[in-house]
Image (spheres, rainbow, N blue to C red):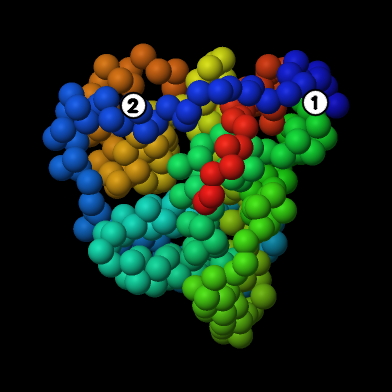
Amino acid sequence: MGAHVSRNDFEWVHTEEPHASRRKIILEKYPEIKKLYGYDPNFKWVVTGMVFAQFVMLPLVPYMSWPVLIVVAYCFGGVINHSLMLAIHEIAHSLAFGHNRPLHNKLFGFFANLPIGIPISISFKKYHLEHHRYQGDEKIDVDLPTLVEAKLFCTTGGKLVWLFLQPFFYSLRPLVVRPKPPMPMEVINLILQIMFDMLVVKFFGGKALAYLLIGSLLAMGIHPVAGHFISEHYMFKKGFETYSYYGPLNWITFNVGYHNEHHDFPAVPGSRLPEVKRIAPEFYDNLPHHDSWSSVLWDFVTDPDIGPYARIKRKNQGLDS
């Protein structure tokens, strides 16, 4: 199974997460960054184009062989679906229509969710905003791997398997670590998604639905765009818990790679995050960052110093979510 990881515990710290304090310092020096807050009016059209691109694929899929379907799902459909997942990330921050139009954001989240095949829009927001506020909290931040994951997948081969299984861990971990009662909007999200999936099967066959689901799963595992799951918060350099990525895949992932900038300013839409770095370069240029998500995945698997344990954690302070 390869080399065993060098760590046998997470990196425990007693400091607060760094982004709120850095945001305050940056705004004191560059108050003009507040002008970047708000929503991007072009966002909804980009997302709509992605959704309809997948709709156009549906009548073509039944004519594909299974090997061709899997290749197309990995190289094309999965990339679009992963981008739609990151669109849902933007929507979770109310960056589709702004904080003053919450219903519009939720409804658009349902729409962006359709090609993904499984309902995630409302549930994602329920947990993701806590990840920002309580980053690294052992009980609240469900982005952290569990102790079981860290112990089981602690070798080179184990880490590779963990990456393949990442869609399941990412989706199911919140239900195990921090279960919450379903919200009415989650039920609506579920019903709409089931109805859409049934319509896909009725009009285009089971192969078309398989294309959507396979693409979603493959693009969350061993896939270049999935490198952001690892690059964002795994500790590649001791003491640093958030990393930005400044490579070309930001073009198709709503600049999620600008992750330090995003955590510092979650009210800034992805399209404007490069402007944050341009305005305040001295706060970001000297932070460790990544230039390739593929290299991140390779290093995660092959470097004994990196693995599920390589995360900064904080003891829960009894804060209520």
State whether residue 321 is above or below residue 247.
Answer: below
Q: Is residue 190 visible?
A: yes
Q: Earlier in the sequence, mark 1 or mark 2?
A: 2
Q: Residue at x 70, y 21 (%)?
A: 302
Amino acid type, label 2: Arg
**SS category of the residue bearing label 2:** helix
List x then y, in percent, for residue 115: 51, 66
Left or right placement of residue 42 versus residue 188 in this view: left
Q: Is residue 108 visible?
A: no
List x then y, in percent, for residue 247: 40, 30
What residue occupies the far front of the structure in this picture? 318
Residues packed near mark 2 inside 10 Å, few (<14), some (14 to 19) or many (20 plus): some
Q: On the rendered image, what quadrant is the N terminus found in?
A: top right
What residue occupies the far right of the structure in this picture? 1
State whether residue 237 is above or below residue 295.
Answer: above
Distance between mark 1 and mark 2 Cα atoms: 36 Å
Q: Identify the image quadrant of residue 24.
A: top left
Residue located beneath label 1 in the image: 155
Left or right placement of residue 163 versus residue 229 in this view: right
Q: Nearer the viewer, residue 112 or 263?
A: 263
Q: Residue at x 68, y 17 (%)?
A: 305
Left or right placement of residue 180 versus residue 3 in this view: left
Q: Residue at x 69, y 31 (%)?
A: 308
Q: Nearer the viewer, residue 58 or 131?
A: 131
Residue 22 numbered tag: 2
